[in-house]
Amino acid sequence: MLKKLSEFKIGETGLVKKVEGEGRFRRRLLDMGVTPGTTIYLRKKAPLGDPLEITLRGYELTLRKDEAQLVILEVA
């Protein structure tokens, strides 16, 4: 099942299938290691759902909700 990262619940893990968007947002995500084939674990969400803290490639990363909407994952 495919899902956007912004729709994940705390504790869910997924495999990046696609990074949508154009320009600087997409480039920023790719530069931070959010690339197809990467496994992502959602660690925390702020009380209002923005930002999200994820774990990938052995480090923690915080993303805004609008950035997380660009990442399409296959739920593990």
Image (tube, rainbow, N blue to C red):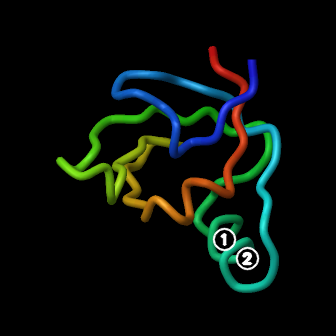
Kindly tell me whether residue 57 is visible in this rendering: no
Q: Name the residue under label 1.
A: 31
Kindly indicate whether the residue at mark 2 contacts the one at mark 1 (C-beta within 8 angstroms). yes
Few, some or many residues within 10 Å of mark 2 (<14, 14–19, 20+): few
| Label ID, residue 76 | none
Residue type highlighted by circle 2: Arg
Query: Residue 72: x percent and y percent?
Result: 72, 42
Q: In this view, does 10 lie to the left or right of 2?
A: left
Of the two numbered discs 1 and 2 in the rendering, the one whose residue sits closer to the viewer: 2
Few, some or many residues within 10 Å of mark 1 (<14, 14–19, 20+): few
Residue at image location 27% in from the left, 40% down from the top:
44
Kindly tell me whether residue 48 is visible in this rendering: yes
Residue at image location 53% in from the left, 65% down from the top:
66
Residue that extends furthest to the left in the rendered view of this protein: 47
Label 1: state its secondary structure. helix
Q: In this view, does 44 lie to the left or right of 4?
A: left
Residue at image location 24% in from the left, 52% down from the top:
48
The answer to which of 59 and 24 lies nearer the viewer is: 24
Residue that extends furthest to the bottom in the rendered view of this protein: 24
Q: Is residue 13 above or below residue 50?
A: above
Q: In this view, does 38 lie above or below 59?
A: above
Determine which quarter of the picture holds residue 38.
top right
Q: Name the residue under label 2.
A: 27
Q: In this view, does 58 lie above or below 14?
A: below
Determine which quarter of the picture holds residue 10.
top left
Residue type highlighted by circle 1: Asp
Q: Is residue 24 left or right of residue 6?
A: right
Q: Quarter of the image containing the N terminus?
A: top right
Task: Give the spatial CA distance, label 1 vs label 2.
Answer: 6 Å
Q: Is residue 43 above or below residue 65?
A: above
Query: Residue 52: x percent and y percent?
Result: 36, 51
Q: Quarter of the image containing the C terminus?
A: top right
